[in-house]
Image (cartoon, coloured by chain):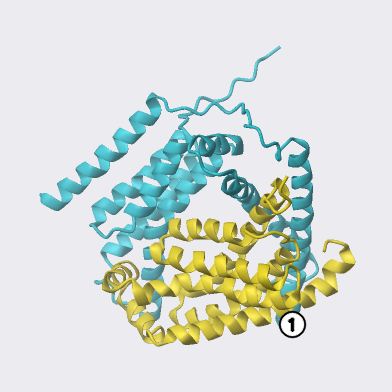
Amino acid sequence: MELYIPKKKFKLDPRTKLFLIIAIATLELLNVNIYFTLAVGFIPFLLFLSNRQFLGAFKYYGLFLIAAFIHVHRIGMEVNMFLNMIVVLLGGLILKLSPAFTTSDYIIESTSASEVIAALNKMKISRKLTIPLSVMFRFLPTIRQENRAIRDAAAMRGITITRRKFWENPLRAFEYRMIPLLISIANTGEDLSAASLSRGLDNPREHTTYADVKFTKRDLFTFLFVSVFLASVYFLTEWL
Amino acid sequence: MNNNALKGKDLITVGIYTALYTACVFLTGMFNAIPILYPIFMFVGPVITGIPMSLYYLKIEKFGMLTISGIILAIFWYISGYTWICVACILPASLLADIFLKVIGFKKFKAIVVSYIFFSMGLLAGPANLWFAGAGYWDGIRESMGDQYADQLAKYMPSWFLPVAIVLIALGSFLGALLGRKMMNKHFKKAGIV
């Protein structure tokens, strides 16, 4: 008999991840200088690598570097005004938003729902907030999946944005896409609440959990690395 | 036990429909990338979210669910780069929506319309930054999005636009609630979901 041995990953405490996403979402919006922005964008890249999402990591940082290149050369560009606006705009959006989105993608990939709940419980956050939040995180991928399935089914009947049938009556087409999605989500929701009720969600006593949530050396290392790295980049580029 | 306290089932409902609402808002929010469409979003956003929200309203039986939705939405907007102003917009909007729903009566169409109009005011969170966050925020936009975008944004979103935006949102929410009711009667009652 073979034992299942999970691949070794650099596992962090959910609370450290929460700190990371807040820090990244705040810092990337500060307009310090381009080096600092690049350094902030480098952290999600490392996080992706630590979770063995190699392809995603290189895709993300490649895109980020291209956006940074556009940002640096945006004034010298002499092209069509409209095109210029769109390119600069897209570059700016990627530069400002992609680090936080990438970090949240990493968090969703690397954390199980029960770990998040256990961590939030340890932070003494009311269950009135933690339950909706965890349901939401579980549901956003489901919505995307359902939407894709409905889009494929609709495309088979010619209801896609590229066909003339769609533009003959766009409101009707929108209805055909929206209503099935809502019905399937509502049904899944009913199932989910029945399932969690039967597992004792409403039990007023304190819940036990398998998830092992505690701070380790890795969290300390991450915390120190991020703060020293960003602070040194900041001081090196601002005062030198 | 207190019957009005929120139970697990209600909390799960809150999570599901807040997720749906967020997905719809982010989808229609794509319009914001083009400055001239920014006012249109104020109108189209509430109309489109009207359908999922109508379904949500028909499941609300207790006070507090909309407020929790509001808190979660505020956290989401904050993380996606809007300042404290979005929190100051969304929290009162959802709280007022909750109070009006409670006072007029749950599941009544009149209450749903009034409450949905207030809830949609949370959408002001996006443009409110432009008017209240001051010059620093504008500099940030100019820096990150380019001069052309900033100029056009200033052109199409002057500060007198605030009352217009409120009217647009109110109108959009009213239409959204009507559309939602139509859809409920047409599809969901038949399917036995409501």
Query: Left of B124 or right of it: where is A223?
Result: left
Query: Left of B67 or right of it: where is A200?
Result: right
For the point 37% across and 86% down, the residue is: B155
Under circle 1, the secondary element is loop
Q: Position of residue B165 (x, y in %)?
A: 49, 83
* Quadrant in the rendering for residue A175: bottom right
* Quadrant in the rendering for residue A79: bottom left
Q: Chain for mark 1? A: A
For the point 73% across and 67% down, the residue is: B106
Mark 1, residue position: A169
Q: Position of residue A224 (x, y in %)?
A: 29, 33
Outermost residue, front direction? Answer: B1
Which corner quadrant holds the N terminus of chain A? top right
Chain for colour cyan:
A
- The amino acid at mark 1 is Asn
Query: Left of A52 or right of it: where is B130?
Result: left
Asked whether residue A166 is in view, the answer is no
Chain for colour yellow:
B
Using the image as rendered, state which of residue B103 and residue A229 is in the foreground.
B103
Q: Is residue B155 above or below residue A45?
A: below
Q: Is residue A120 above or below residue B184?
A: above
Q: Residues within 10 Å of mark 1 (few under 14, many from 20)?
A: few
